[in-house]
Image: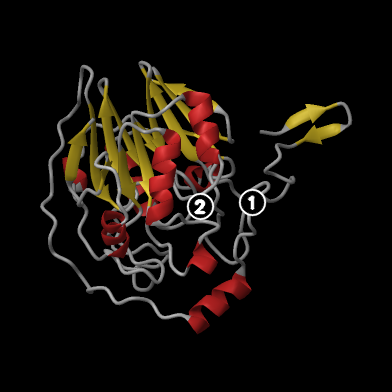
Amino acid sequence: MLHEAADGPSFPKYFDGRHFHNPNSSQVPGWLDVIRWKATSRAESSPSFIDDVRPLTPPRAVDGSGLRATFINHSTVLLQQNGSNILTDPVWSPRASPLQWVGPRRRRHPGVHRDDLPPIDIVLLSHNHYDHLDLSTLRWLARRRSPAFIVPSGVAALLRRRRIEPVFELGWDETRTLRQVAIHAVPALHFSGRGLFDRNRSLWCGYVIESQGRIVYFAGDTGFGNHFAHIREKFGPPRLALLPIGAYQPRWFMSPVHMGPGEAIQAHNILGAAASIAIHHGTFQLADDAVDTPGRVLLESGRPDSFYILKNGESCIV
């Protein structure tokens, strides 16, 4: 990511040498905005727990031309194609929090028991927020499944300190090829931080997964922006897109960093995706929208039939 120039080190446009940012985009809300949000709005109520998940045991592998996607929970999806198994932002913990006695708690079980996971080749982490980078789950995966971990710039040290390896960092528009699968890190509109003093000290991203001419796009967490058109132009229309729809209310606060359901439909259309799956909903309540509001609103927003809303543990083949 850092390059040497004649007059000293040069940095990509999204990094100033200390902090990462979203170039030419709306300002990400700060701590004063958080206080205003909490003081002026009221979250929709959600059930304390919804016991409606029927856990699935995925196949060990999918060969041939099929692409199987299993929605496990939140932004955790198991992608199986051409004999490879890829897991996105895996979270199995009871809370999305640094502490397991406080913070956003799980409202549904995962759709796959950890012990029922097949061999995992690659784990993709989009950024370091607790609902996407769950150290307890990652330590378990490193011990029990031995995958390679791909992370955005600045995140690898967190994993290596806990012996979660091998781990490879990517900046936007950089690529790593593992097991004949090319992983391209692509821009997203978001932010990072796990505490009070590390805000935007690491990068955030989406990923384009390229295998035997097939494109899968995992958006991670992102606001709506022109990066969808950039991805379509550079890689072509994806066979499958994983698009976030939840934690979108109130819009004045969330829109720079989280799409709403209607914007996810726009992104699906801009990408020209053959199919999309809604992610970032249904398990944790992280904003004012209730745990099942994003999926209901997506259904009511005239989504195309190719935009799937899967329950935890459901799969589709595209």
Residue type, label 1: Ser
Q: Which mark is residue 263?
A: none
Residue 276, picture quadrant = top left
Label 2: which secondary element: loop
State if disc 1 and disc 2 touch (CB < 8 Å): yes
Question: Which of the image's four quarters has the N terminus?
Answer: top right
Which residue type does callout 2 highlight?
Gly
Where is residue 179? Give x, y as percent: 37, 20
Q: Secondary structure at mark 1?
A: loop
At horizontal 51% and vertical 52% (from top left) the residue drawn is 223
Q: Residue at x 40, y 62 (%)?
A: 247
Q: From the top left corner, tell me how far across and down residue 255 is, in percent.
A: 51, 60
- Position of residue 248 relative to residue 12, above or below, is below
Residue visible at 30% across and 65% down in the picture:
293
Among the 4 quarters of the image, the one containing residue 36: bottom right
Q: Is residue 278 visible?
A: yes
Classed neighbour count for the residue bearing mark 1: other residues with Cα under 10 Å, few (<14), some (14–19), many (≥20): few
* Residue at the (40%, 39%) spot, across then down: 269
